[in-house]
Image: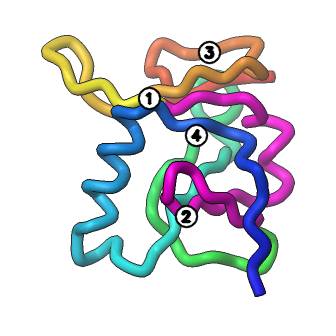
Amino acid sequence: MNTVLAAPVTLTSSATAEVKRLMELQENQGKFLRVGVKGGGCSGFSYVLGFDDKLDADELYDIDGIPVIMNNSHGIYLMGMEIDWEDGLNARGFSFKNPNASTTCGCGSSFGV
């Protein structure tokens, strides 16, 4: 049985709407939204955001009806982070506002702690 925990990250209303739209695509049905980090990028870490299957090391969260998974060890890097969706002329895509990041890169998807 999966226990659903309080999520360490939040999604804005525009990010929630975009994720729900993407979840309806055939290739994403039955998948979880994975939020995490990986080594690399200009500042040391890069954000992971995509659809995936749940692994044993993952924690399960519910954010506004979206099943979200995150590797348990990633929480220290992402606690309190807000994920937004921008759909404008100057910017289009997901953006990350991470209070744990001590440095960020101009690309917006890389950070250091």
For disc 1, the neighbor class at 10 Å (few under 14, some 14 to 19, many from 20) is some
Residue, x 69% and y 77% (percent of image)?
Answer: 55
Kindly identify which residue carries mark 4.
Answer: 47
Residue 43, how many percent across, how many down?
66, 22
For disc 3, the neighbor class at 10 Å (few under 14, some 14 to 19, many from 20) is some
What segment carries the magenta color?
59-83
Kindly identify which residue carries mark 3.
Answer: 104
The Cα atoms of the two marked residues, 4 and 1, are separated by: 13 Å
Quadrant where the C terminus is found in the figure: top right
Point out the frontmost of discs 4 and 2. Answer: 2
Residue 83, how many percent across, how many down?
51, 32
Task: Name the foreground residue: 102 vs 44.
Answer: 102
The Cα atoms of the two marked residues, 4 and 2, are separated by: 18 Å
For disc 4, the neighbor class at 10 Å (few under 14, some 14 to 19, many from 20) is many
Point out the frontmost of discs 4 and 1. Answer: 1
- Of labels 2 and 3, earlier in sequence is 2
- For residue 50, side relative to residue 23 (left or right): right
Task: Name the foreground residue: 49 vs 30.
Answer: 30
Point out the frontmost of discs 2 and 3. Answer: 2
The Cα atoms of the two marked residues, 3 and 1, are separated by: 16 Å
**Residue 84: image tag:** 1
Kindly identify which residue carries mark 2.
Answer: 67
Quadrant where the N terminus is found in the figure: bottom right
Rendering colour mode: rainbow
> Is label 4 in a helix, a strand or a loop?
strand
For disc 2, the neighbor class at 10 Å (few under 14, some 14 to 19, many from 20) is some
**Residue type at the position of mark 3:** Thr
Callouts 2 and 3 close, C-beta under 8 Å: no
The Cα atoms of the two marked residues, 1 and 2, are separated by: 17 Å
Rendered view: 85 above or below 30: above
Q: Image quarter for residue 58?
A: bottom right
- Of labels 4 and 2, earlier in sequence is 4
